[in-house]
Image (spheres, coloured by chain):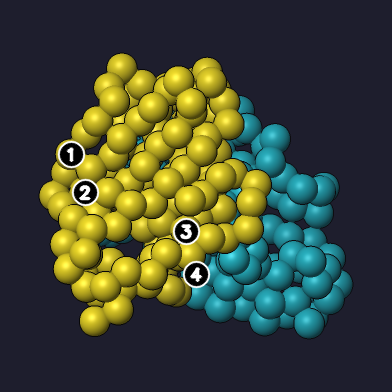
Amino acid sequence: GAGVSQSPSNKVTEKGKDVELRCDPISGHTALYWYRQSLGQGLEFLIYFQGNSAPDKSGLPSDRFSAERTGGSVSTLTIQRTQQEDSAVYLCASSSLAGANIQYFGAGTRLSVL
Amino acid sequence: GESVGLHLPTLSVQEGDNSIINCAYSNSASDYFIWYKQESGKGPQFIIDIRSNMDKRQGQRVTVLLNKTVKHLSLQIAATQPGDSAVYFCAENSGGSNYKLTFGKGTLLTVNP
């Protein structure tokens, strides 16, 4: 596609439920990133995938958070047993090797945990 | 101005004026800096970047200035337009990382017609 696509755009869930957020990166981009953005805050790095290398998971806040990237393209961020403090916008970005630091973002998934 | 770790500052300007958004970065080993614009309900959009071997870079209506001595970055927007209203984030490449960016909390720019 023309840009990074994320789905769903909005997700409302009940505390304790699991959620899956999806990211389709720009075609041909080998690097993929997940960030979390709380209201009025900057972007908090969660995880980074680059090709077939082991992902950098250093930003995941707890073991309830996990992500995978299948076939080097689509990625899924999973949050298990959601808590109210997980409510935020989850942003995905991708970049190419040629411009590794220029990350192109999707519109995000707004997660609300009731 | 903005500094990583502080509350979101705001800047209000009149249409046609020039805007200057400031950012203090944290890591002296960072050698790449980037500005993003985020409109309400959208993801951040790349504006301009600069490497540490430069102190100024110009784009279309935007200029980024880098002062490594005091670890300060600024974004200048010429002839600000209502469409420029957004939150602006600076980011640094986390101590020289070739992929990880550390973002500031952003500055809200409001352009009054």
Identify residue for label 4: A7
Identify residue for label 2: B62
Kindly tell me whether residue A91 is visible in this rendering: no
Q: Nearer the viewer, mark 1 or mark 4?
A: 1
Quadrant location, the N terminus of chain A? bottom left
Identify residue for label 1: B58
Give amino acid for label 1. Answer: Gln
Give amino acid for label 3. Answer: Thr
Between B92 and B43, the residue placed more toward the observer is B92
Locate residue A13, reporting x and y percent: 73, 79
Q: Do callouts 3 and 4 point to residues on the same chain?
A: no
Kindly tell me whether residue B65 is visible in this rendering: yes
Q: Which residue occupies 33% across, 25% down? A: B51
Chain under callout 2 = B
Quadrant location, the C terminus of chain A? bottom right
Say left or right for B41 vs A56.
left
Say above or below: B80 vs B91.
below
